[in-house]
Amino acid sequence: MQLHHSYLTELPGTFLRHMPDVAPSPALIVLNDSLARSLGLELTELRDEGAAWFSGGTVPEGADPAALAYAGHQFGGFSPALGDGRAHLLGEIRGPDGRLWDLQLKGSGRTPFSRGADGKAALGPMLREYLISEAMAALGVPTTRALAVTTTGERIARDGALLPGAVLARVAASHIRVGTFQYFAARGDNERLRALADYAIRRHYPEIPDTPERYLAFFDQVCARQAALIAEWMGLGFIHGVMNTDNMAISGETIDYGPCAFMEAFAPGTVFSSIDRQGRYAWANQPLILAWNLARLAECLLPLIAGDEAAGVELLNTRLEGIAGLYRREWLRVMRRKLALSGEDDADGALIDDLLTAMTGADWTLTFRRLATLVEGDPVPLKALFGDFTKMEAWLPRWQARLAPGAAAQLRAANPAVIPRNHRVEEALAAATEGDLAPFRSLLAAVQNPWEEAEYYMLPAPQGFGRYVTFCGT
């Protein structure tokens, strides 16, 4: 496995070299064969060496472990120095298509950015990231991926319990975040800020020409990718849970699966995270936080946009004013696909808004999936999701008038049968923590084939499951 180091070579002063902790008794428990093949990696080598490589025990030959510097707004409050507190970038893998992919260990020990934390991770949260990132990838959502999970042989103290320690090997287009730009902007380091922007353009947006206007074009491209990404989240009922600026990747990938979950009963204010007490990152607020985070990126790029600050402010404000419309177009694109609408119509926005009003309280995923059976003449499965079907019944004729030919097949192709249902995730992680990986492997297989109907994994949590709360795992 040959590793490259373009980030470390081209961006000195943006990281601190630091070795991962040595795991006392590492074991490779999950290896992502399909991802490994897509990266051109040798599976036999990974199975033989993975326990050592992916636990930090013995890093691969040519690795140059480093913790990356970044800042960030966390729940609206600015922290000027965050950085990788429990992660080590080993290097970059060059895939068969020539693209570079970061290989990072997460939960691999303390770094100079740990801020008093232990730098470790428990098995459950690492398997959660593996599971949900694989679900997102199967659903066609841009995302970081998990290459492997290893146990370390340690016991990690969390919430009064000693849990099995683990390390996640994560593959990402890069780990450049909005917070990476904030780190250097906060220090007035325009030289490194420019170098970072130029590197991000070369790596993620090589189509942008090398002109003085390239930083504005870069901002436009980041806005476009992020608007498309958040619209996909919204269409799936996905709630990231911690949309801090340090968790927004410049590449346009979903990154940092902590207190995330998929909404079941539709309620716009749904929050799962135990620390989001004000609902800042609720489902309905995610498009608003998209714009807020992009405004923070715009502030960082201002010194690069124009020689005259007033002119730069005007240019960036114009872009920021357009983000709501940009997102709305992406949201309509996603929802037209989910509803199998024929072409575009000016009234589609109202049609979609009225659907959301009508389906409040009904299961998000199953409502869209069962529209296909209604189109085929059987309304019973859809009606079973509603306590009161009156509003939905009034909405349906308007929708049916807009349907494309072959709507049932389109609906099934656009709306998954299986998502990582919260009770099934907890069931699998609890079993894995006790040493039984069978439920995790079964659930993983189901979410990797989300269009295939598997009743055990399709149904929402039983009423006795109660309110679902998620945690960061740190």
Image (cartoon, rainbow, N blue to C red):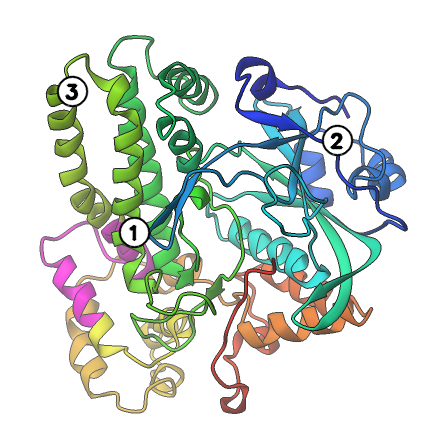
The amino acid type, in three-letter code, at marker 2 is Leu
**Residue tagged 2:** 41
Q: Earlier in the sequence, mark 3 or mark 1?
A: 1
Judging from the image, what secondary structure is the residue with disc 3 in? Answer: helix
Magenta stretch in the rendered image: 331-355
Q: Is residue 298 magenta?
A: no
Question: Could you tell me how far apart the alpha carbons at marks 1 and 2 are, in whole angstroms?
Answer: 37 Å
Looking at the image, can residue 401 be seen?
no
Looking at the image, can residue 397 be seen?
yes
- Is 371 left, or right, of 308 in this rendering? right
**Residue tagged 3:** 309
Quarter residue 267 falls in: bottom left
Q: Is residue 343 magenta?
A: yes
Identify the residue at horizontal 34%, vertical 64% (top origin).
Answer: 282
Identify the residue at horizontal 79%, vertical 39% (top origin).
Answer: 56
Identify the residue at horizontal 47%, vertical 63% (top origin).
Answer: 416
The amino acid type, in three-letter code, at marker 3 is Glu
Residue 21 x %, y %? 78, 41
How busy is the neighbourhood of tag 1: few (under 14 within 10 Å), some, or many (20 plus)? some
Name the residue nearer the viewer: 424 or 270: 270
**Residue tagged 1:** 289
- In this view, which residue lies farthest toward the front? 116
Judging from the image, what secondary structure is the residue with disc 1 in? Answer: helix
Q: Earlier in the sequence, mark 1 or mark 2?
A: 2
Checking the image for residue 105, the label placed there is none
The amino acid type, in three-letter code, at marker 1 is Ile
Identify the residue at horizontal 70%, vertical 31% (top origin).
Answer: 18
